Amino acid sequence: MSTATIVKWGNSQGIRLPKMLLDSVNMSENDTIEITAKDNSLILKKADNAHHKTIEELFEDFDGEYEPINIDWGDPVGDEVW
């Protein structure tokens, strides 16, 4: 068993994981992981599919109707790009 300390990392917090521990679960630097919280614990799991989903993949199970609407965001207040 290893221990680690939660430290400030910019506006977030982070921990350093020992390489030996990562090696034991076949993980390494720059791997994408899934993080879930359950029963007052954090569970780290290597992501099965590390690519970003396309818009088509995100909505492949959507069976509702879509009607685009125009939204009035008001007048420009700064240097917005038109």
Image: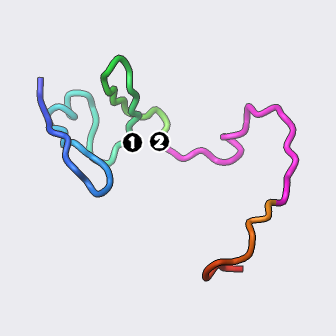
Q: Is residue 20 inside the magenta stretch?
A: no
Q: Earlier in the sequence, mark 2 or mark 1?
A: 1
Say whether residue 53 is left or right of residue 21.
right
Residue 79 appears in which quarter of the rendering?
bottom right
Q: Which residue is mark 1?
A: 32
What is the spatial separation of the Cα atoms under label 2 and label 1, in whole angstroms? 6 Å
Q: Quadrant of the N terminus?
A: top left
Residue 76 appears in which quarter of the rendering?
bottom right
Residue 28 appears in which quarter of the rendering?
top left
Q: Give the structural element (helix, strand or loop) at label 1.
A: loop
In the displayed structure, 65 sits above or below 71; it is above
| Label 2 with label 1: CB-CB less than 8 Å | yes
Say whether residue 72 is left or right of residue 43.
right
Q: Which residue is mark 2?
A: 50
Q: Position of residue 62 (x, y in %)?
A: 76, 34
Task: Residue at 32%, 27% (x, y): give it.
Answer: 42
The amino acid pointed to by label 2 is Ala
In the displayed structure, 32 sits above or below 48; it is below
Of all residues, the one furthest to the top in this rendering is: 39
Q: Is residue 62 inside the magenta stretch?
A: yes
Residue 11 is labelled as none
The span shown in magenta is 51-70
In the displayed structure, 39 sits above or below 50; it is above
Say whether residue 81 is left or right of residue 31.
right
Q: 50 or 13: which is nearer to us?
A: 13
The amino acid pointed to by label 1 is Thr
Q: Give the dominant element type of the magenta stretch: helix, strand or loop.
A: loop
Q: Position of residue 18 (x, y in %)?
A: 14, 38
Badge 1: few (under 14), some or many (20 or more) residues near its Cα, within 10 Å? some
In the displayed structure, 17 sits above or below 52; it is above
Q: Give the structural element (helix, strand or loop) at label 2.
A: loop
Q: 70 or 34: which is nearer to us?
A: 70
